[in-house]
Image: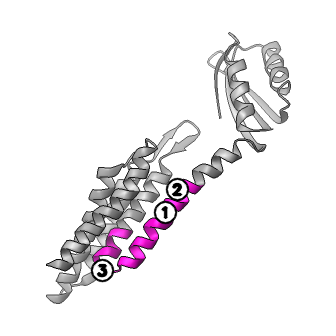
Amino acid sequence: MDDILIKIFLALVLGGALGLERQYHDKPAGFATNCLICLGAMLFTVLSEFMSLQGGDPGRIAAQVVTGVGFIGAGSILRDGNKISGLTTAAGVWLVAAIGMAVGYGQYFWASLCAAAILVVQLGVRKTLTLMEFVKRYDTFYLTCEPNWQVVNKIIKQIEAQNVTILKSEVSKQDNRFHVSLVATFTGHDFQNITRELLEMPEVYSLFK
């Protein structure tokens, strides 16, 4: 009885800690979701061990946990145009289930170590990305504007005025609009300035990367 209480407590603590990080950064699958996934994976693992004592296959239920969590993770992945979001959340859900299974098998040290490692990566990556905002890198941004070549030239000059080097440009016409894609080297701060200035132009309809 004491053993199952320890597993329930540890599953809630580890799943909750990872969920709090996601919820604090306003991401899907927050505190309650991660607690439930970790606790559910732990319980299924304990049941699979109980089945082995009754002569059943100990890996059958545990294997289905991985498949089931895959469906939950897939539901958090969204695509919006050229941008895909939710991959980190899906990977986090998958890892929380793995931690729950480790707790279910009594591997408390490994479960705690992996949970700590995930928190370090999540928090460390965010700080690294903040620093990357000041480093120039290759990227592509897309915009739609009036179907006028003078407008396109004006946009390019406006961008180059921000000390941004344009490496490649492509223009296509669709729905009576020019769709422009530009490959350039710029920092995150540069992109903010470009976005602010270009969207003030009445000839520019949208801008994203």
Query: Residue 198: x percent and y percent?
Result: 71, 19
Where is 192 relative to 15, above or below?
above
- The residue pinned by badge 1 equals 118
Q: Which of the two marks, 2 or 3, is nearer to us in this view?
A: 2
Q: How many labels does the image show?
A: 3
Which SS type dominates the magenta stretch? Answer: helix
The three-letter amino acid code for the residue at tag 3 is: Tyr
Judge the density around disc 1: few (<14), some (14-19), many (≥20) Cα neighbours within 10 Å.
Answer: some
Tag 2 and tag 3, C-beta contact below 8 Å: no
Give above or below for 95 relative to 178. Answer: below
Disc 1 marks a residue whose amino acid type is Ile
Q: Which residue is drawn at 49% across and 53% down?
A: 88
- Say which quadrant the C terminus sits in: top right
Q: Residue at x 65, y 52 (%)?
A: 128
Residue 1's disc number: none
Q: Nearer the viewer, residue 206 or 173?
A: 206
In this figure, which residue is indicated by the disc labeled 3?
Answer: 105
Contact flag, marks 1 and 2 (Cβ < 8 Å)? yes
Please rate how many residues cluster around mark 3, counting C-alpha atoms within 10 Å: few if below 14, some from 14 to 19, many from 20.
some
The stretch of residues the image draws in magenta is: 99-124
Image quadrant occupied by the N terminus: bottom left
